[in-house]
Amino acid sequence: MTISEVQDKIIDEFSFFDDWMDKYNLLIEMGKDVPPIDPKYKVKDFLIEGCQSKVWLRPEFDGSVITFTADSDAIITRGIVSLLIKVLSGRTPQEIISTELYFIDKIGLRQNLSPTRSNGLLSMVRQMKLYAMAYDARQKIK
Amino acid sequence: MKDISEIRSDFPILTRKIYGKQLVYLDNGATTQKPQCVIDSVNEILTFYNGNIHRGVHYLSDMASEYYENARQKVASFINAGKKEEIIFTSGTTGSINSIAFSFGEKYIAPGDEIIVSHLEHHANIVPWQMLCERKEASLRVIPMNQKGEIILEEYFRLLSPKTKLVAVTQFSNALGTSLPINEIIEAAHSINVPVLVDGAQGVQHGIVDVTKMDCDFYVFSGHKIYGPTGIGVLYGKEKWLDDMPPYQGGGDMVDKVTFGKTTYNQLPFKFEAGTMNYAGAIGLGTALDYLSGLGREEIASREKDLLSYAIKKLSQIDGVRIYGNAPDKISTVSFLINGIHQYDTGMVLDKLGIAVRTGTHCAQPVMDYFGIDGTVRASMCFYNTTEEIDILIDGIEKVKSMF
């Protein structure tokens, strides 16, 4: 699936629910699908700053695509990071850098994007893009 | 006292719906909502009486100055200060503490001196003292706490020494709601001539505060936590200290005579009020204090005590809820966690049910570290809350438990 197709699928899944409790239940379920980060990487280096809950995110680059694994001590946050992983994991650095994450707005998580929000969705997005930029730059140097 | 429906109708925001649900506002420790009379008074000053205070000869400036000075008198009466000149308006509790840390520190703190705070302080009563200690090569000593969330008074007595130059403690823990034995703290410090600053950010709005009887040397609080506007705060200081301390900021209105050679300072309180003050905020604060006096401060304390007992009783009945801070003497604040559920998840779900609570460390990380936790959920109630709202919180917690 293309990045847009994955985003559209997420929007579709959330569109069944108007009630926030149902949306949260869906996020909680999705959180269970997060590719788990190896516990030995649950250290400060992989901790994302700016979240009220702890989020660990680790990138692995095989020379063409970046694979992310993650975890959080809060379950809704794990659901949110799972969405980002669904969309961005297994993509090339260039794809990750240039993708516009329109699904966030469409499923009603837009308010979570403001820089002062404590859940750190913005920090997660920024961190994933930063990793992609770093790998992209390293490739260009080679 | 007015009945609860009359009281609630004074606060327009309380009728709001959030995500389609009736707002249940239980974050009063962070900021309180404003009664219509406060909103009206700020509106009135900006609409009809706006002129820069203490500066003009014209009517508007005179009127604004008069209202501003009336507000100062209202604050002085509210906390029973000896003189209105002992009331300095600031930007808030943080502004007041930073101002004292600078002015007092410049005059009285030397290398090797010690400042005592408690383990229960919020960051605003820790960081300014750390910065001062760094500047002056002084050190910060901390009164330890116990599992109930109280400070250990015997340890405080042991910390007091000839090196002690100031004691700065909060009246109530913002994170746990527990009370500190302020009278004993002040008495012991005064017995060796050490002044005491009391942080009243979580104190002054919950009952009667009498700084003369308390005999504290400094008392500070924020306007927005006592039903007034944001951006205004109070620094009460005994005249002898304020007279002796150098001003914190230089600028207009705080001076007597300015030449490029030397400037002499204005008298109290203006010496500490450089530049154009937040007069609209001060006037709004004065109105808020009038409102509370009108309701009856003993009645406010009594209503809040009942709400606290009810909340503790109801929360204790829920399986898996642990309350942090079990001292018998508390303000109407309850900090808790649901077993195995992150405070952030709890807060997110409660929010969508229209319930406003605070989650996290409450700007008091040392308290959280003491309990070995990352944070709590804090429900801070005040006189306009109801037992029905606490029931809605309890139902919300049950909902959270069923989801995670």
Image: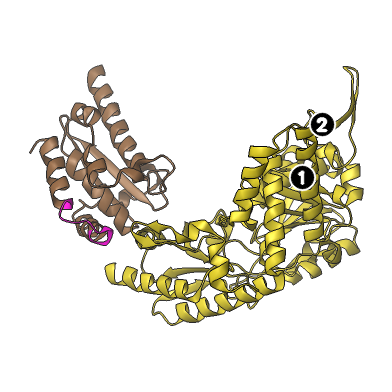
Residue, disc 2:
B253
Rounded to the nearest angstrom, the CA distance separating label 2 from label 1 is 17 Å
Instruction: Kindly tell me whether residue A125 is visible in this rendering.
Output: yes
Whole-percent x, y for residue B368 in the image:
53, 61
Q: Can you tell which of label 2 and label 1 is closer to the viewer?
A: 1
Give the numbered dot on residue B67: 1
Along the viewing direction, whichever of A89 and B1 lies nearer the viewer: B1
Whole-percent x, y for residue A137 in the image:
27, 22
Along the viewing direction, whichever of B258 and B363 lies nearer the viewer: B258
What amino acid is at disc 1? Answer: Tyr
Q: Mark 1 Cα within 10 Å, few/some/many (few <14, many 20+)?
A: many
Which portion, as a residue range, is magenta? Answer: A14-22
Q: Mark 2 Cα within 10 Å, few/some/many (few <14, many 20+)?
A: some
What colour has chain A?
brown
Give the numbered dot on residue B25: none
Whichever of callouts 2 and 1 sits on the residue coming sooner in the sequence is: 1
- Relative to A129, B366 lies left or right: right
SS at mark 1? helix
Along the viewing direction, whichever of A120 and B63 lies nearer the viewer: B63
Check the image and report above or below for A95 versus B32. above
Residue at 75% from the left image edge and 39% from the top image edge: B64
Q: Which chain is yellow?
A: B
Quadrant position of residue B55: top right
What amino acid is at disc 2? Answer: Asp
Colour scheme of the rendered structure: by chain
Q: Does the magenta-highlighted stretch encompass residue B19?
A: no
Q: Label 2 marks which chain's residue?
A: B
